[in-house]
Amino acid sequence: MDKTKRPLRKSKRSFRRRLPPPIGSGDRIDYRNMSLISRFISEQGKILSRRVNRLTLKQQRLITIAIKQARILSSLPFLNNEKQFERPESIPKTAGPSIRNK
């Protein structure tokens, strides 16, 4: 048999490296555990998706509930928009309305 006509054998295993789970077995998902909750929130204050977090469905539900409880209790802001409090540099500061003496 000719070696060039031999069918290619593909490996059935994927060599994708498994990453450690983001939530350990001892971590408690709770609205008071701010160090854990803050890992699953974007810079804008949005809840990250399950695909990005690499969480199970049950863990994602518990994280979502904990984040919403923390927002209601004012432990977390609903939005993390720091730009709304900054003054734009293009607008010059004025001293106020000018008063004319007659």
Image (spheres, rainbow, N blue to C red):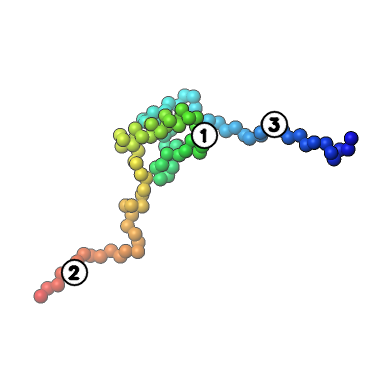
Asked which secondary structure carries label 1, the reply is loop
In this view, the residue in front, 11 or 63, is 11
Q: Horizontally, is 15 left or right of 44 in the view?
A: right
Q: What residue did someone put label 1 on?
A: 54
Disc 3 residue type? Lys
- Mark 3–mark 1 Cα distance, whole angstroms, equals 23 Å
Q: What residue did someone put label 3 on?
A: 12
Foreground disc of the pair 3, 2: 3
Residue positioned most to the top: 26
Q: What residue did someone put label 2 on?
A: 98
Query: Disc 3 or 1, which lies upstream in sequence?
Result: 3
Disc 2 residue type? Ser
Disc 1 residue type? Arg
Q: Tell me the quadrant of the picture where the C terminus can be found.
A: bottom left
Asked which secondary structure carries label 3, the reply is loop
- Mark 2–mark 1 Cα distance, whole angstroms, equals 60 Å
Q: Tell me the quadrant of the picture where the N terminus can be found.
A: top right
Q: Horizontally, is 86 left or right of 15 in the view?
A: left
User: Who's the residue at 28% across and 63% down the image?
Assistant: 93
Residue positioned most to the left: 102
Query: Disc 2 or 1, which lies upstream in sequence?
Result: 1
Q: Horizontally, is 47 left or right of 20 in the view?
A: left
Residue positioned most to the right: 1
User: Who's the residue at 44% across and 37% down the image?
Assistant: 40
